[in-house]
Image: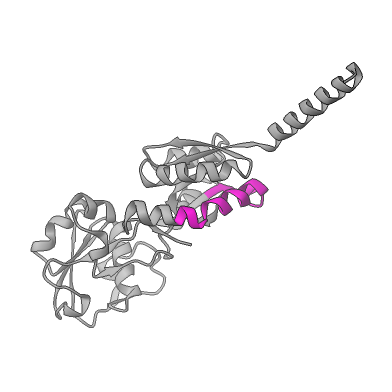
Amino acid sequence: MSPKTLFAAIALAASLAATAHAETKTVKIGVSPGPHAEIFEKVKPLAKAKGLDLEIIEFSDYVIPNTALDAGELDANSFQNQPYLDNQNADRGFDLVSVATTVNFPLGIYSAKHKTWEDIPDGATIAIQNDPTNGGRSLLLLQDKGIIKLKPGVGFKPGPADIVENPKNLKIIEIEAAQTARSLEDVDAAAINTNYAVDAGIEPTSAILRESPKGPYVNIIVVQAKDKDAQWVKDLVAVYQTPEVKDFVETRFKGAVLPSW
């Protein structure tokens, strides 16, 4: 090979390497520890094949990931649901948008005394969480299943006072969310968040009522509004919502976490 030809070959190789490097985009994504982080570790090699180098950054709170995304310190995050994002945008003036649904940690209603909801007697005592977000979520679950009816327009934080129809005359009592699992021996049924159910050794799939994986509390991937139509966002969503990732979620979490796709 002549020096001229060799030089041309080296130049071409350098050009191709530079092009390949330019086509790889680093995406900084903020996640909460646990399932969200584990799932994105599974997504990471799939994303690599699409030219996305995922940098997964864990946050232990629910405020900083949106603040960091709004400031451009992150490219995306995955830890929250739509009602939470709506509140953050309204309260903090963020311009952040959802681009895909991910997984749900379905809230369930459990009973130590009755095998099915149909066994719950009229006048039964049902424990729900005493904070507006989780308690409201439990009431919305009861409404979704046709058990109660709430006032129109109550949003995502209804309370017992917002119940307008209660055919079974259920007695709704409010207790600390962390205590709902412990209340099972004292009530006919209790609404329990998945994390507290797992901590108490309760199998999430044993719930007698359970949220839909596609309900309003399904988690989402969030980006800045200006990036919502970017190709890297479309590629990230595509590699997340794959059969491989779905199979991983179903196998790894055994019903405690449900894929939305």
Give residue 255's position: percent from left, percent from top: 32, 59
Number of callouts in the render? 0
Q: Residue furthest front?
A: 1
**Which image quarter: residue 49?**
top right
- Let me know if residue 223 is in the magenta part: yes
Give residue 217's position: percent from left, percent from top: 40, 60
Instruction: Name the chief secondary structure element in magenta.
Output: helix
Q: Nearer the viewer, residue 232 or 98?
A: 232
**Which image quarter: residue 16?**
top right
Q: Residue furthest bottom?
A: 167
Which of the image's four quarters has the N terminus?
top right
Q: Is residue 51 above or below residue 240?
A: above
Q: Residue furthest top?
A: 3
Q: What residue is shown at x 35% (from left), y 61% (from top)?
A: 157
Give residue 178's position: percent from left, percent from top: 20, 51
Q: Nearer the viewer, residue 150 or 16?
A: 16
Q: Is residue 7 above or below residue 254?
A: above
Left/right of residue 207 with respect to residue 76 in the rendered view: left
In this orientation, does residue 219 appear? no
Q: Is residue 215 above or below residue 90?
A: below
What span is in magenta?
Answer: 222-246
Q: Is residue 29 above or below residue 214?
A: above
